[in-house]
Image (cartoon, rainbow, N blue to C red):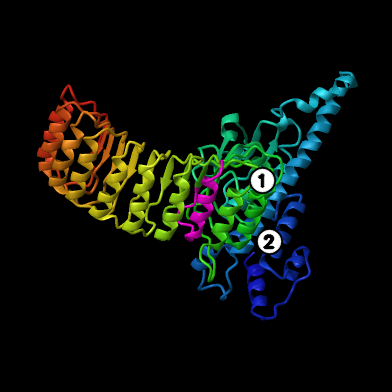
Amino acid sequence: MWYVFLCFSNRQRNIPDQQPTSQLSALFRDATLHDLHKTAVDLALQSKNGHLDLFLRFLLGLSLESNQNLLKHLLPQSSSHSNSSEQTVQYVKQTIRDQRSSDRRINLRERDSDRYESEDEDDSDRYESEDEDDSDRYGYEDEDSDRRINMFYCLNELNHHAVVEYKMSSEDLHVETLLPGEWGTKLWKTFKMSEEQLAEFDLQKYIKTPEEDQTELLSPDEVLLKVLPAVTSALLAECTLTEKSFESVATVLQSPNSLIELDLGQINLKDSGVQLLSKGLSSPHCKLQTLRLSNCGIADEGHPGESAQKLFSAILENPHHKVEALRFADCKLPEKSCGIVATVLQSPNSLIDLDLSHNDLGDSGVQLLSKGLSRPHCKLQTLRLAECTLTEKSFESVATVLQSPNSLIELDLGQMNLKDSGVQLLSKGLSSPHCKLQTLRLAECKLSERSCGIVATFLQSPNSLKELDLSHNELQNSGVQLLSKGLSSPHCKLQTLRLADCKLTEKMCETVTSVLQSPNSLLQLDVSDSDLGDSGVQLLSKGLSSSNSILQILRLE
């Protein structure tokens, strides 16, 4: 094994080696590391007594860059082979599948042969549908099974600890794997994905946070094309998808399918992924209602946001389906994307949830968006514009929308340079009888105690606000004192109040306790990251024990 690997490394450095003539001679003719691995795998599988099993496992383990680093003083300098290792993983997995398919055909023939001796041939059809619980009696304990188990050990050497095999029916996905802890007993584990799991297929569950008996089951390229046609919701965020994965997604979207939710957040789409997805999103077969591409790693050289906008346009302008939710946070969308949304909102549409956070939309972009928000066809209920580098001019546009008939019930303007002047502008819209907002997020907006006074005035007039987030602003105790006037008002319906990291101390607890002891609607209060001290917490406990307090959740840290 050591000699074979050294000869391969030396040949890459143009150092001639003496190639032996033996059963292993084929190994010395391979040009790439992946070819070397394939040849070694094939030779090990051909061995009848398994004498090459350990040789293969050590060779694969030695090929890992992490192991070579440990032995760098014994090995010649060589280039990285991470891609070759992944190719080898896929080759070994395919080898196991091929063996499994062959075993199943043999097992069925042997089982049928055994039973035909005592039963008529007319009954043979039912054997095809019987469970394979008796598989150990038909070939699983033979030398082919041993070769197959060695392939599992090989995957372990390559840091892949289990293999998936699947068979799809109209409703179910069956996944079979050899449990790592049970290799000695050759226990094959089969589990069935329920209809609920297929309805919301979360790929992370199977490749990142597996259950105890489902260790690292799926790789995206192996399963997406099989699973996606059967699911309605595909959560693929933070998964390492390749171009082949995007081909699978695009293929499903372009053929009859039931997919209505697709989450591709925090994935590096690259240009090839964008091109493939655009075709799928533009297809008349595409029925997506929710698309999430937050932080999707689209890089456009010289034309920021061009690729993201291409996807944005593809789904919004597709007349064959009605999109309800779009999450395009941190996708480098330009301001003209707001124009596309506005155009859609001005005609009959079904868009109710839009996240454009962390995009440089600018005031002109929000101004374009506001034209659509005020139209009678607009049904948008949730709008997220956090960290979109806006100025007072944008807040004025938002206030104008809130003062006219609209459907907004959730608004996120967090992480912006809003300041007290921006809150003052917003208050005009918040106080309007047309305003239906139930959730308002103004976290990390450089607000002071003055903003608390503005909000308190709004809370003392008829309103529908149920959730308010003022976290990460320097409101201080005096700000909470002003806010308490609104919280105690009979018009206040606020159920959730977040004041985390607002420079609060023990004195604030007196104010909050007073609010809790009077009639109020607070169910959840967050004052975490505050310097309350034991005495402050003791004060809060008095408020919690009041008959007027209905608080269910209190966050202190």
Give percent across and percent down for residue 24: 74, 64
Quarter holding residue 44: bottom right
Dot 2 alpha-carbon crowd within 10 angstroms: few under 14, some 14 to 19, many 20 or more: many
Q: Secondary structure at mark 2?
A: helix
Badge nearest the viewer, 1 or 2:
1
Point out the image quarter for the N terminus: bottom right
Residue designated by label 1: 253
Quarter holding residue 214: top right
Dot 1 alpha-carbon crowd within 10 angstroms: few under 14, some 14 to 19, many 20 or more: many
Give percent across and percent down for residue 98: 75, 46
Quarter holding residue 224: top right
The amino acid on which the numbered mark 2 sits, given as a three-letter code, is His
Looking at the image, residue 423 sits to the left or right of residue 111; the answer is: left
Q: Is residue 382 visible?
A: yes
Is residue 372 shown in magenta?
no
Please tell me which residue lies in front, 379 or 447.
379
Residue designated by label 2: 37
Q: Is residue 527 visible?
A: no
Q: Which mark is residue 83?
A: none
Please tell me which residue lies in front, 15 or 540.
540
Give percent across and percent down for residue 290: 54, 42
Give percent across and percent down for residue 402: 36, 43
Q: How many marks?
A: 2
Q: Secondary structure at mark 1?
A: helix
Looking at the image, residue 115 sits to the left or right of residue 353; the answer is: right
Highlighted magenta segment, given as a residue range: 327-348
Give the Cα distance between marks 1 and 2: 36 Å
- Report the residue that reaches farthest toward the bottom: 15
The amino acid on which the numbered mark 1 sits, given as a three-letter code, is Leu
Please tell me which residue lies in front, 194 or 448.
448
Q: Residue at x 64, y 76 (%)?
A: 10
